[in-house]
C-alpha cells in the first residue's frame, strides 16, 4: 500500500543533475572574445566582465592562467601595481583555454 507521498513522487519528473559551471578561465576567455579593444586592464574586467570577476584576486589569478595558455600577453606596466594585457586573437570559432 503506497501513501500519498509515494504517489506524488511517481508523477514528479526525474531530478536533473546540476550542470557544472565552466572554468573561470574559460568564462573570462569567452567574454574576452566579445571585447573589442586590443588591450584590457583588471579594472575593465571587474567593471565590464562577468560578475564572478568582481575581486582583484580573481581577476589576476585568472588572467595569469590565460597568459600561460597564450590568450593574453602581459604588457609593460604604466605605473606601480598596475597590470595590462593584450588580447590575443586567434581564428577559432569556440576557443578553449587549454588549446
Image (tube, rainbow, N blue to C red):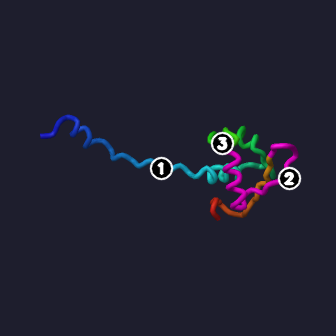
Q: Which residues are magenta?
A: 58-82
How many neighbours does mark 1 have within 10 angstroms: few (below 14), some (14-19), or many (20 or more)?
few
Mark toward the start of the polypeptide (2 vs 3): 3
Q: Is residue 81 left or right of residue 14?
A: right
Relative placement, left or right, of 5 versus 55 is left
Q: Could you tell me which residue is drawn at 81 percent across and 52 percent down?
A: 38
Quadrant assignment, res 74:
bottom right
Furthest residue to the right? 78
Dot 3: within a 10 Å radius of its alpha carbon, few (fewer than 14), some, or many (20 or more) residues?
A: many
Choose the circle earlier in sequence order: 3 or 1. 1
For this view, does 76 lie left or right of residue 53? Answer: right
Which of the marked residues, 1 or 2, is nearer the chain's N terminus? 1
Q: Is residue 94 visible?
A: no
The residue tagged 3 is 53
Looking at the image, which is closer to me, 63 or 14? 63
- Relative image position of residue 9 (x, y in whole percent): 26, 40
Find residue 52 and report its horizontal and vertical position in percent. Answer: 62, 42
| Residue 88 counted in the magenta span | no
Amino acid at each position: 500500500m503506497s501513501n500519498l507521498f509515494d504517489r506524488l513522487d511517481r508523477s514528479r519528473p526525474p531530478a536533473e543533475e546540476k550542470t557544472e559551471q565552466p572554468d573561470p578561465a574559460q568564462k573570462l576567455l569567452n567574454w574576452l572574445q566579445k571585447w573589442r579593444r586590443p588591450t584590457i586592464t583588471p579594472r575593465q574586467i571587474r567593471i565590464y566582465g562577468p560578475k564572478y570577476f568582481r575581486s582583484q584576486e580573481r581577476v589576476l589569478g585568472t588572467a595569469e592562467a590565460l597568459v600561460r595558455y597564450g590568450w593574453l600577453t602581459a604588457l609593460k606596466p604604466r605605473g606601480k601595481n598596475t597590470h595590462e594585457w593584450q588580447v590575443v586573437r586567434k581564428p577559432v570559432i569556440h576557443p578553449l583555454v587549454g588549446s
